[in-house]
Amino acid sequence: MKKLMLTPILVSILIVSVSSQDLSTFNKYFIDETMRIDYYHIGDAKDEFITLDQIYKYGIWAGSRVNLIDEMNLGRYCVKIYDSASGELIYSKGFDSYFGEYKTSSEGIDGIKKTFHESAIIPYPKNKIIFAMDRRDEKQNLFEFFRKEIDPENIMIIRDEIKDKLVKVYNADSNSDPHNRADIVILGEGYTIDEKSKFEKDLKYFTNVFFGMEPYKSNQDKFNIYGVYKPSEDSGIDEPPANLFENTVLSCTFNSMGSERYILTEDNKAVRDLAAHVPYDAIYIMVNHARYGGGGIYNFFCTFTTDNQFRDYLFLHEFGHSFSGLADEYYTSDVQYNDFYPVGLEPLEPNITALTDPANIKWKDLLTPGIEIPTPWDKAKYDSMDYKWQAERREMNKKTAQLKRERQSPEVIKAAEDAYARKDKEHSQLVDSYLRKNANYGKVGAFEGAGYVANGMYRPMLDCIMFSKGERPFCKVCETHILKVIEQYTE
């Protein structure tokens, strides 16, 4: 794989003209700068509403100036921007959010309302716009539930220069023009002032991991990758079960949504303020921690830890969620969602299906000729093996958390962590060996078990980086979809 040089940069980017493309719509309605609309998303499973926070003007526009309307039809929500005078739709973007996940939790279903901070990033409008928000109904159709007129000339829009003396920006892999590239920013979390060199090393390592994986490898010229470092007071992040809490730049934490390995942050403003130092389409949060964990929310952000044995997998798997809207294909792990995929409805995600219409399965064009639908795969034996490990894994993690709470010696804690890592690796190898022996391994069909659902939900191939841990590729369906997403960011 290509070896990448890291150099500190000042963010001033030469914009390459795109005379071969139609920029008439962009030039009519927008200027080449960014508007960030911050708002609060409030509610529960039944009710939700939006209140505006602040609006910012800064930087150049990172996205495509040609592909202004989102045609992916993914995400629970969609930001829509209309020209106020004509009512014409001039920009849209589908996404998921932390609130969208919260409302599927037991607390959300029980009517406990909660507030989350979110941001809409759009090209800066020339004239007054309507900022509208759509959400999905029970049949997956979008409907508008919020709208507000915004005047880009409003004197209360924040126009401060983006600067922070503690922040350092790195050019990890740049092909220049952000309009014609998918622009990725990797934010450092939990790196102290003494761990700057580790951030640089990690940034270089994971940039190489990214471009070692298809379809990113063959499309390296369609990406820009930046790193943004700001020192945290403490190293690592919060581990609530272990009663360990750290003072960090982005306030990330394990045990988000009650899931021991799920890492998110509710400090959206801190994330967006740090990311604003570069033009970006997608956000990685690189968490300086040895414990396994991560998370990814579509067109929101993704997180991963840097120093565990499955770090490459985490880095690529979570980005599959946040960049491409891919679903988790596994189903045996505990999650805190209730009816994440409602029974009887076809999921929006491209890589799982409820098989409501087998003759017209969504990846019909990629099916292995003559494959049986649904596709047999000795599921019962796999279930027995994996559910057993999941139960054992939970107990081992509880024990380690207890040792940390009791402030046992580093040697005792490390012994427990090493024992877990060893068994986790052994189980991963066992799963890999078991799947590879199946007669339908490597074929595209419809394999039952996907999207946190053991029965009635199907994935395209037996294995994929969205299904199991370890060194493995995206399945053909996932890879095909990722290519479509990449093209949305190019002109």
Image (spheres, helix red, strand yellow):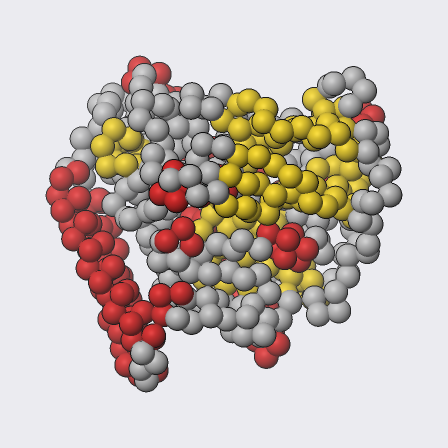
Whether residue 20 is situated above or below residue 260 in the rendered picture: above
Whether residue 329 is situated above or below residue 251 in the rendered picture: above
Q: Residue at x 87, y 43 (%)?
A: 155
Q: Quadrant of residue 438?
A: top left
Q: State the quadrant of the C terminus.
A: top right
> In the shown orientation, is residue 291 left or right of residue 214?
left
* Viewer-closest of 70 and 412: 412
Whether residue 116 is situated above or below residue 92 in the rendered picture: below
Q: Residue at x 54, y 62 (%)?
A: 251
Q: Residue at x 74, y 65 (%)?
A: 164
Percent across and percent down for residue 483 are 52, 35
Percent across and percent down for residue 13 are 78, 51
Whether residue 58 is situated above or below residue 242 in the rendered picture: above
Q: Residue at x 28, y 42 (%)?
A: 331
> In the shown orientation, is residue 276 left or right of residue 390?
right
Percent across and percent down for residue 29 are 80, 28
Q: Quadrant of residue 328?
A: top left
